[in-house]
Image (cartoon, rainbow, N blue to C red):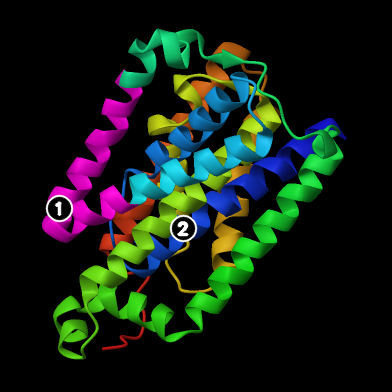
Amino acid sequence: MGYLYTQIARFLENVVIETGQHLTMSIAGILFLGFPVSLSLGAYVFAIIEKTGDSMVLAVIGALCSSLVLGVLFALLYRRLSNDSFAVFSLASVLAFDAVLRSWDSLTGGVLGIPGVSRPGFLSSFLMLVLFQAVVAFLFLLFEYGILRSPLGRSLQAHKESKIFLDSLGVHSKNIGSLAIIFASFSGAVGGIIMIWRIQFLDPTFGGIPILLIVLTMSILAVKPRVLWMVGAVLFVTLLPEILRLFPLPSSIVGHLRLLLYSALLILLVNKLSSGYTSEKRLV
């Protein structure tokens, strides 16, 4: 049962993380590559505050607020940079934050990380943690469903198709994109917190490029503006590496093979995307 609960937990964590990125990249067409920073920042702020002996509630609030501030900073940069420049900058922020985590030993523990991260008492059992993650994931899916059916959701889809036409309708495209980026940062922080409650250990490998590859793959698969399509993409990408368990491979290379598998799938999807296999009816 432990293996089953772990896979369910991974799926639910990915749903929470992907919800924000689905609205940002898949729906709005914004190549926001800095969301791993939000995920890692939220987890590290929570772990650092919790280790100082402060209450768990204060640690959660601090983690969420720090990621919201980071999201606002990303949004401000998005308003001032071109799309390509913003993509490069947000990707560079992932590498820069990784360097900070590895070098600031006194605060982050460096490459050794922070062991023994606690979780709330009512989540002491793994089953209760999975049930709590299911509630959080359901709330995020419900929120996204409401967004997609609202004028804001239609504006996000129009943002991907024609920013100029959207501006001509009196809807500022930069404002729409900024809201999506802030929400993506928030969902990344929530995903980081519930993920760290599961593994209870934190080091620089927690986020970074590996999670970037996974979420980008899910975002490209979930290009359609439908919640069920996104859930299906998350389920497929989450369970895809498990086929490696069918082969007698050394445990030391399984992790690397997973990244190679995600990378190969990402290359295939980008190639198919450029061929127009995900064409949708235009809104504007």
Q: Is residue 225 magenta?
A: no
| Residue 274 appears in the rendering | yes
99 vs 88, left or right, is right
Span colored in magenta = 72-99
Q: What residue type is labelled 2?
A: Gly
Image x and y of residue 46, in percent: 56, 32
- Closer to the N terminus: mark 1 or mark 2? 2
Query: For the point 51% across and 45% down, which residue is it?
Result: 64
Q: What element carries label 2?
A: helix
**Residue at the (42%, 78%) spot, across then down:** 153
Horizontally, residue 175 falls left or right of residue 233, namely left
Q: Mark 2 points at which residue?
A: 20
Q: Does residue 79 show up magenta in the picture?
A: yes
Q: Name the residue under label 1.
A: 84
Whether tag 1 and tag 2 are in contact, CB under 8 A, the answer is no
- Residue 191 image point, x, y percent: 57, 44
Task: Tell me the tag on residue 268.
Answer: none
Along the line of sight, the residue nearer the viewer: 62 or 180: 62
Looking at this rendering, what residue extends furthest in the front direction? Answer: 54
